Amino acid sequence: MKNIKLCVMLFVIALAYNCKTDNKSDLAYAVESKTDSNGFAFESVANDPTGLRLYTLDNGLKVYLSKNIDEPKIQTFIAVRAGSNYDPKESTGLAHYLEHMVFKGTDEIGTADWEKEKAYLDQISDLYEQHRAESDPEKKKELYKKIDEISLEASNHSIANEYDKMVASLGATGTNAYTWFEQTVYVNKIPANELEKWLKVESERFSQLVLRLFHTELEAVFEEFNRGQDNDYRKRYAAMLDGLFPNHPYGQQTTIGIGDHLKNPSMVDIHNYFDKYYVPNNMAMVLVGDIDFEKTIKGVNDAFGKFERKEVVHPILPKEEPITSPVIKEVFGPTAENISIAFRTDASGTKEEKLVTMCDMLLANGTAGLIDLNLNQQQLVQNASCSPTFLKEYGYHTFTGTPKEGQTLDEVKLLLLGEIEKLKNGEFDEWMLDAVINDLKLSETQRYENNSALADMYVNAFIKHLDWKGRVEFLDDLRTITKQEIVDFATNFYKDNYVVTYKRQGEDDSIVKVENPGITPVNLNREKSSAFLTNFNAIESKPLEPKFIDYKEAIKETKTDNGINVSYIKNEQNDLFNMNIIFDMGSDNDKKLGLAAGYMEYLGTDKYSAEELKKEFYKLGVNYYVSAGAETTYVGLSGIKENLPKGLELLEHLWNNAVPDKEAYDKYVESIAKGRKDNKTQKGSILWSGLMSYGKYGENSRLRNIFKVSELQAMDPAELVEIVKDMKNYEQRIFYYGKDVDAAVAALNTSHVVADELNKYPEAMAYLEKETGGNVYFVDFDMVQSEMLFLAKGDPFKAENMAASTLFNTYFGSGLSSIVFQEIRESKSLAYSAFSNYSNASKQDDSNYVMAYIGTQANKMPQAVDAMMDLMTNMPEAEEQFNAAKESTLKKLAAQRITKSDVFWNYERLKKLGIDNDNREEIYNTIKNMTMDDLRGFFNENIKGENYNVMVIGNKKDIDFNALSKLGKVQEMDIDYLFNYEQPEEIKM
């Protein structure tokens, strides 16, 4: 119940239903047909904790509505049953590329003169058809050059990012979209008072497709393709699917598409796909949040009810033959070796889905599954887990493992298969069936509280054609499954019918590399506005007033009998609790503390083995953790409130009576060493951890202040156990979030016994931030793209600058309508991902930083660097865009609500900055009065002329070092040195 695997698990469960139930269950979850006060018919499910109303408009549009008034926001999804499965075979990647283009506007949005623009777009479409048909490379280049020329002419009449500007002006957050096998889904989270305007812009957006600014966006999609080529996980996943589905598009058509198809698109095919699938009876709108049901459905009908229904026939996709012997796949790349084993399953909504779900949780639930206890707890592998995925037509149950040092992938495979054999032999306790269902119930309860998670569950029910009734009763159905059913199913299901995929280290000879096409930057015309945008901006919504927190009132205080302060907030939603015993010291105070906290995971006591302890906690439905950060250590519990006393008693028993285990410690050290080795193969960790830290601190950093493996090997594990036990003797405080603080304090009085006088914290190690400028730190890595991070040390934190920095980031550096995104990606197509921000410190005495990032093909890097540096020196000023950014920022603040346990944690964050009140009020009032002159002043004082350290990771043979040398002294960094790891030959295991 405590790891990412369960998040994946619950995503999968969200897709499930069952049409066979007993009469009692049918009665408990009866589907009820009702009519609201406007005369709109809807369905609901009795005893549905989400309170869903499912409407179907006359044109077939499904509308999922659920009310949650925790915050004045609405999570919106517009889902289309159209994904990569339905791409034409000669146009793979089409559904995903179409997703990008739906952001470009219509004949009303994004155009200054539609008739003139359309004439150019028609020419571009014809040229792309010629380009696609042409086989001569030189003639193709000439055609592309013509496309580039006419695209520039067309851009004289287009207006970039008008859709993004409009939704940003509403105060929307999370504006995005995604495409997968069977769906394309468009996402926004909007303030509740802006629903009418949002419906207006979305109804226009989906009314037609205009493929403007096409070739620049196509290049951005190819950059996304390159990012996929640099992602070994995606490559392993694609190979696994190819083995599982040798005929079905699940395995034969990737969502991103084939590189050759991306470079030879057909605008005609894209229009045909849109016209076929983007019709109301193939779409759903999901709105979860602060809504009025009757007003909302009327508004949706007014906006989308006019869309014309069309017959939609999805293609009949191939069926797969059973897998009768292991299928072997291999992929290569620079990251650490790992393995996956996958079994093909039936689809969502089948009996098999329920049985696989139970098998999966019995095998790996993050705490007490067979894999958890026998492989991870025993440290027989570096890590291992499993998770199922259920789709519309099939599914798959995937097992993954990473080897220890000196262990082969085949040895990991045998260990994983061995745990499946234990499942087939019934080597699990009967009580585990109820425990895993309770675990799923707890996580489901948490998802129901989250508007985004709940909306996602509705989307998946729609895409998979699942009745919501089946989703509501899913866990009840699991409770009817017996141990013998599971054993019989596992015996028949898990055979030699799997696909094993070996992710090996080595060069990938399938990488597709392309030349820089030399795109002419298109015109953005950010000073222009369409008539639609002008009219849209003139519509006034009822203002939403911000609400700020009196933290001293919201966070209540009490004490335990031994005088420990308990801060608490009442959980008004459900019976879940979270309790943290907080020590304001961490590894900065004691370098061994983090090491000791991690070691506790593998220890038992004089009464329980480590495995028995895991089982005892899992029986209770309680999760515990000991987590030591650099400055703070948490000992915590979470789970069901009635089990808090027993859970705390068990935690305190472990805390007081943990027994050192030399064998477990030796394996723990081996795991740390292997983790360091694997970490060196992760480009994200190298850039954002290793290089970033070195750019800030140089050699004297928290990241580099680690024990060598030889030092770890020489330590006495008993000392580490005593460090954790001795924590109780230090000053501490407690935060409780739950329904019954009196019961929580009573449990603390009984079980959490500490000394009358508590010790002060040891002095913390200090790490000094270095001045930046004149340095280029480079790491050679086998990758297609190159990634760059610019970092400039600014002034120490000033609370009075938070308003200006917030507005600056919205206007300049982050979001789809920001200056950086428009210039780097939209106009010049130099990167898929580019952003810049002014990053405020997390502590009062630390410095702020100016940051910028670019991820692009190495052959575009010089142009991308020039473009970014020009922006960081000369901020483009657009009054209308500034006003939109200001309005967006104010509306986001007005709709923001800090609730539940977040009230406490947010206050903790503010106190580190020396702020003891809700400073959002000051930020809000300051931004209201800001002008472009104020923003220019902030830019000139804090951004312009800053001296940057530049961190670069890329393939050495592709990098233009002459271009890099213009930014400073280029220094190639050794990865072991960055992290202060020992060289491989120094480690003797």
Image: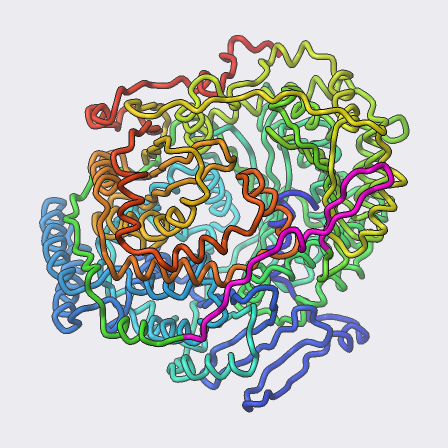
Percent of width and height locating residue 62: 51, 76
Is residue 489 visible to the viewer in this orientation of the structure?
A: no
Is residue 875 visible to the viewer in this orientation of the structure?
A: yes
Quadrant of residue 377 in the image?
Answer: top right
Q: What residue is shown at x 54% (from left), y 23% (from top)?
A: 676
Quadrant of residue 451 in the image?
Answer: bottom right
Quadrant of residue 523 in the image?
Answer: bottom left
Percent of width and height locating residue 373: 75, 35
Magenta residue check for 558? yes
Magenta residue check for 984? no
Q: What residue is shown at x 50% (from left), y 53% (from top)?
A: 920
Percent of width and height locating residue 145: 11, 50
The image shows residue 616, relative to residue 782, as above or below, that is below
Q: Looking at this view, is 265 or 975 the one in front? A: 975
In the image, the segment drawn in magenta is 541-569
Q: Looking at this view, is 790 or 669 the one in front? A: 790
Q: What residue is shown at x 76% (from left), y 41% (from top)?
A: 565
